[in-house]
Image (cartoon, helix red, strand yellow):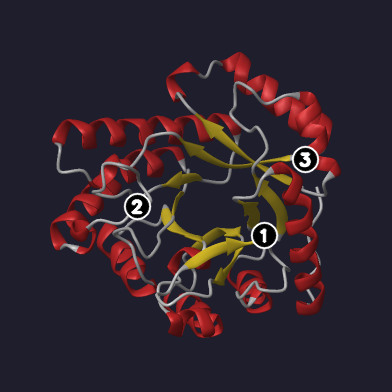
Amino acid sequence: MFLGVAGFNSEIKQISGPTAKQVRETGFSVWQIRVNDPLAISDKDVTRIKNLFTETGLIVGQTVGNYGGGLCSADADERASAIKFVKRMVNVTKRLGGPNTYFRPGSMNPRGAWLPHSANRSQAVFDRLVDSAKQICKVAENEGVPLAVEGGVVCPLYSPERVRDFLDAVGSKMIGLNMDPVNFVGSIEDAYNTTGLLERFYRLLDGRILGAHAKDFTLVDALLPHFEEEVIGAPRAMLDEVAFLKGMEKACPKGHVLVEHYPAEKLGVAADGLRKFAQTAGIKWDTV
């Protein structure tokens, strides 16, 4: 597996030589690329990124587009716009030579794609999301670019079982899971048994995992359950990172594990924490 990062200033138009050097010096081999507008990406932009990554010794990672949560929207125009955006992201990913493009399931909450809404677990929302994915998969299959689906307890894909059902319903070999187990911690039972949560993912989605995002979490001392993200390796961090990495090594041995959601000054600390867990797991990171 390759250790990478989803962070720093990685919008494709703003990626710079000094930042690429910083990513490499922090110990990452892979850098996720963000895209605000796929239509604005010229051949010159693609060539610049490829040359810069080669010069710096970096691998082009997963691409992620800025299209919000519209793939499950009840508004036909909003959903059509999001579908068109992701189709264009597939094309950009193909041109860059990236491993996959990120598929964000979205939410019915108008305030954000990763915020809860009572309708997110409804059959109607699930069916719209399946239809959106099927439309995008036609382009993904033509281009040979996989779609990496993420999920989480607040969104329409809220459990390992729901993710499996979604992939089954879409029925394409070009769509799989972007493994991010912290997103799925929704109960005290899961928080205190992340090993069991991970086992469900690796058992139910065997052969369908494309890569992973790495972070950690903690359970806040409070009357009502409240979870917060925590730096990997911190004393209060709760994810079984060893089981996470062992499962990824088996499921996706050449995949990219991208440290995410930390400010630049903590990315190196989180990466060091993950390296220690990898050492405990007997895993050696691949190099460029």
Q: Quadrant of residue 117?
A: bottom left
Residue placed at 66% from the left, 65% from the top?
253
Q: Position of residue 112 (x, y in %)?
A: 34, 44
CA distance separating discs 3 and 2: 30 Å
Dot 2: within a 10 Å radius of its alpha carbon, few (fewer than 14), some, or many (20 or more) residues? Answer: some
Tell me which amino acid carries mark 3: Val
The tag earlier along the polypeptide, 3 or 2, is 3
Dot 3: within a 10 Å radius of its alpha carbon, few (fewer than 14), some, or many (20 or more) residues? Answer: many
Q: Secondary structure at mark 2?
A: loop
Is the Cβ of the residue at disc 3 closer than 8 Å to that at disc 2? Answer: no
In the depicted view, which residue is nearer to us: 57 or 207?
A: 57
CA distance separating discs 1 and 3: 20 Å
The tag earlier along the polypeptide, 2 or 1, is 2
Can you tell which mark lies on residue 254? Answer: 1
Q: Position of residue 35 (x, y in %)?
A: 51, 30
Callout in the foreground (2, 1): 2
Location of the N terminus (image quadrant)? bottom right
Residue placed at 65% from the left, 32% from the top?
9
Residue placed at 45% from the left, 71% from the top?
185
Does residue 288 sit above or below 76 in this rendering? below
Q: Position of residue 164 (x, y in %)?
A: 35, 69
Q: Which residue is mark 2?
A: 115
Q: Which residue is mark 3?
A: 23
Q: Is residue 144 left or right of residue 238?
A: left
